[in-house]
Image: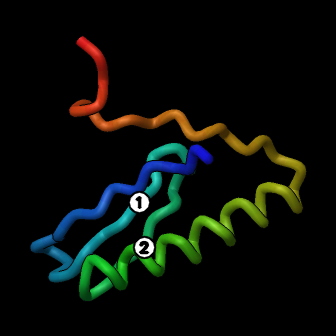
Amino acid sequence: MKDYHINIFYSEEDEGYIADIPDLMYCSAFGETAAEALAEVELAKSAWLEAARAEGKPIPPPRYRPAIYKAS
């Protein structure tokens, strides 16, 4: 099953980890560890999808691929 790509990176400014899902606009989360940020963004993803369904808004298919996976 294809799922949404998740970016996780350390933010010096926030002194913690940020996780985001590029295909779901504004879907991101914070954690003191990378694992915590991942768990939080999974919750955010569920809430994002639930809200979109409830409002009858389109749900984008998983498309984002980091540059390292793109064919030349």
- Whether residue 63 is situated above or below residue 8 in the rendered picture: above
Tell whether 52 sits left or right of 9.
right
Residue drawn at 46 percent across, 80 percent down: 39
Tell whether 24 sits left or right of 16.
right
Q: Can you name the residue that lies furthest to the left here?
A: 12
Residue drawn at 53 percent across, 71 percent down: 42
Name the residue type under label 2: Ala
Looking at the rendered structure, the secondary structure element under dot 2 is strand
Residue drawn at 58 percent across, 44 percent down: 2
- The quadrant in which residue 14 appears is bottom left
Image coordinates of residue 4 in percent, x first then y, are 52, 50
Residue drawn at 52 percent across, 44 percent down: 23
Looking at marks 2 and 1 on the same chain, the residue that comes earlier in the sequence is marked by: 1
Q: Nearer the viewer, residue 34 or 17?
A: 34
Q: Which residue is mark 2?
A: 29
Image coordinates of residue 65 in percent, x first then y, are 38, 35
Image coordinates of residue 58 in percent, x first then y, are 78, 41
Q: Nearer the viewer, residue 72 or 19?
A: 72
Q: Are marks 2 and 1 in contact (CB under 8 Å)?
A: yes
| Mark 1 nearby-residue class (10 Å; few <14, some 14–19, many ≥20) | many
- Whether residue 45 is situated above or below residue 56 in the rendered picture: below
| Mark 2 nearby-residue class (10 Å; few <14, some 14–19, many ≥20) | many
Q: Which residue is mark 1?
A: 20
Tell whether 31 sits left or right of 40.
left
- Whether residue 38 is situated above or below residue 64 in the rendered picture: below
Name the residue type under label 1: Asp
Q: How is the image coloured?
A: rainbow
Image coordinates of residue 7 in percent, x first then y, are 33, 56
Real-space Cα separation, disc 2 to disc 1, in angstroms: 6 Å
Q: Can you name the residue that lies furthest to the front here?
A: 1
Q: Nearer the viewer, residue 63 or 26?
A: 63
- The quadrant in which residue 68 appears is top left
